[in-house]
Image: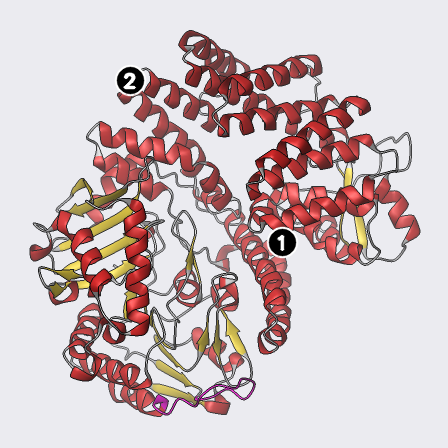
Amino acid sequence: MTHRETTDTPRRSESVYEAYLTAHPGEGFALIRLGPSALTHVHFVEEEFLVPSAFAQDLQAGATISQEMLMAAAWEALGPMARHGAGPALGAQVLVAVGGNQQRSAADPRRHVRLVLSALDGFRGRGLPRHEGRGCLELGRALTAQGSIPDAVTAYARGRALLEEAGDDHGLRAAHARLAALMARLGLFEQSLLHAEDGQRIGRRLGDGAPGSPSGGHEHFTRFLHHQRARALTRIGLVQEAEAELAQWRESTGDGDDHDLLAATAELRISQERTDEAVEAYIRAIDARFADLRVAALPGRTFYLENSATVFGGAVGSAMRMGRADLAIGMLAAMASRGPARPDGAPASGTAVLRGLDTEIAQLARTATGAAVARDRRGLHSLGDRARMLLETREAVLHESSSERRRVTVTDLARSVPRAVRPGELLLHYGRSSEDEVVLFAVTGGTVRDLRLNLGTPEVERLTSDAHEECLRRAGSDALNRLGEAVLAPVADLIPAASRIHVVTQSILEDFPFHAAPFRGRPLVTYAEVRLLPSLAPLRPDGVRRPERPADRPARAVVAAVRRPRYELLPELQALRAEAAAVRATFPDTTGLYDDDATASAVHSALGTADVLHLAGHAAFEPAHPNMARLLLADRPLFAFEIACADRVPALVNLSGCRAGAERRSLGGEGEGLAAAFLAAGAQTVVAPQWPVRDDAALRFNELLYGQLSRPGTPLGQAVRDAQLGLMTDSRFGHPGLWGAFTMLGGL
């Protein structure tokens, strides 16, 4: 989408933005004017908004800019504007920013509420009922996300009153749409139906798709209200009326592949016990939103996934009731990211934007260093949010410029994913069902089974937490043993025949060390090599495949080891030189970066040349801001968000630092953290500890690992397994909290 500044839209009076620019000239902002259609989107209170001037210069140069990038630029203007205090222009900008960046606002519900309250402060007492009314609607959305339902209802009621005073039909329609959704969430489907019908009456008054009527947000709420009415009628049991609503919706849109229409159709078919038709509709709904590579990789993808969780739950459950576990695994694979896009083929405009983003990322790293050293948790949280925005924007640019147009459907994935599991391999996918049960899909020999655990979800979650504590304390293993036997019992007949086991966990068991889980009295790793996959993405036919290293070229290794960074009061790690010696003994072509030489820039350069990267030293990870996970190098930390932006990373990365393997997962399986950043940037395999480890355990593990790799022809997976087994049988490290920390992530 290309946006350009326009100045020919007639105005009856000066807008709040024009007044702001008059009062504060030379602020470095440009006014983006969209025209009357902007007001069909409820998060706009004016026909325009502000962006930094540098962004507007890209527009004038003819750069192709996505909607996500435009809204991200609107968010960028908030900080400089806030220096002048609350006011109507800042309030209007806040609504554009939080409404146009829904994934970002949803990441921190409390901040979302605070921002909207500040916007309302700028509107009150200024005779701006439309602005204040739409602000109340955004407050209702923020309070709903926070779980403050009574307060959300109050905010919506106040918003409706103000919008009626302003004569704002678009805003009133949005109010009824959001109330319909809220009532449905509470199970009050009769109330939901009334609000949906009130919203549709206002829509007819507005023209509802008639020629010449405003589009954009208007069309969105037309579809949304159809969906809410159809769902309410279905839940109430008025099947014929629901069928008529779907038929009217289908006729009004002329799009039989509309995601929400198909999802509503599937829900109705389930209520009619027409499971086959429900599954067909669900498959078409998932394909409509996620089959296209570029759409599935956009920054809003996680937001779409979270808002489609009900669809995926219903779809997977319906496929299982049909006895089609293969379709269920295809649906789950549709949730997975395709992997990183590379900037090689980006057009000149995209390359220019990427250069600007990379400059901002470098500046952010410098700012984040100060916050990390000062232990400024609030600052790290804010910077982590900024890092996520930059990563999302960068990903959008890369995928917008990608020439890939291939569509991969659920049916394609149902066929290809089982075939991707090679002979002798076993794939285990653990997740939650729509009934909140733990569901296990086992894939082997080209077939898929769906199985159940004997433990309920609350018990699994409790035992996972207890097992993690046992490993941290290195005392006892009751929870680890009980949970391990329970999660592996359903595939007891499959494990003995497997030489390699891939494990995917989604919203359950994410901190559980599967390789250390007992099976028939022995850890699983004694039976087979065990790898953790972040999602089903590596099994997708359109997943990213890195080129193989030429067989006649020896592997190039880089070791970066910092015993104690000067900017942190941390204990000195004495064993790092010995770890480096183990690497050099296996890979003669090894470059060593020790202590003061192991700077962030030197390690970043090594990412582009090494085949093997061994990083030894202190690391930090906080779940609240995982993009701020960092390796503590000589001059400053190297952050996860910097690694994720690298154009190339080594095939094998060994992170020998406490909690270097820790991450926070999104719904589709994408993680955030150090190991996840390397995988996102294209690493084939990452070896890292999931929790803090002793120096002597880390040294012995690495000596065993590189000793195995020094044997010609030894596969990496076998070398990791042998190192795990060697550490396990050493009496000094026999507790799973010591040998079980070392995990292999990614790769097939």
Along the line of sight, the residue nearer the viewer: 210 or 153 = 153
Amino acid bearing label 2: Glu
Task: Give the residues in magenta.
Answer: 563-576
In the rendered structure, the answer to whether residue 204 lies left or right of residue 395 reads right
The overriding secondary structure of the stretch rendered in magenta is: loop
Q: Give me the disc on residue 273.
A: 2
Who's the residue at 41% across and 34% down the image?
310
In the rendered structure, the answer to whether residue 41 lies left or right of residue 721 reads right
Q: Secondary structure at mark 2?
A: loop
Q: Secondary structure at mark 1?
A: helix
Neighbour class for label 1 at 10 Å: few (<14), some, many (≥20)? some
In the rendered structure, the answer to whether residue 335 lies left or right of residue 322 reads right
Give the percent coordinates (x, y) of residue 611. Answer: 34, 74
Residue 574 sits inside the magenta stretch: yes
Amino acid bearing label 1: Ser
Per the model, the C-alpha gap separating discs 2 and 1 is 52 Å
Q: What quarter of the picture does the N terminus occupy? A: top right
Q: Which residue is mark 1?
A: 349
Give the percent coordinates (x, y) of residue 641. Answer: 52, 65
Query: Residue 556, located in which quarter of the rendered image?
Result: bottom left
Q: Earlier in the sequence, mark 2 or mark 1?
A: 2
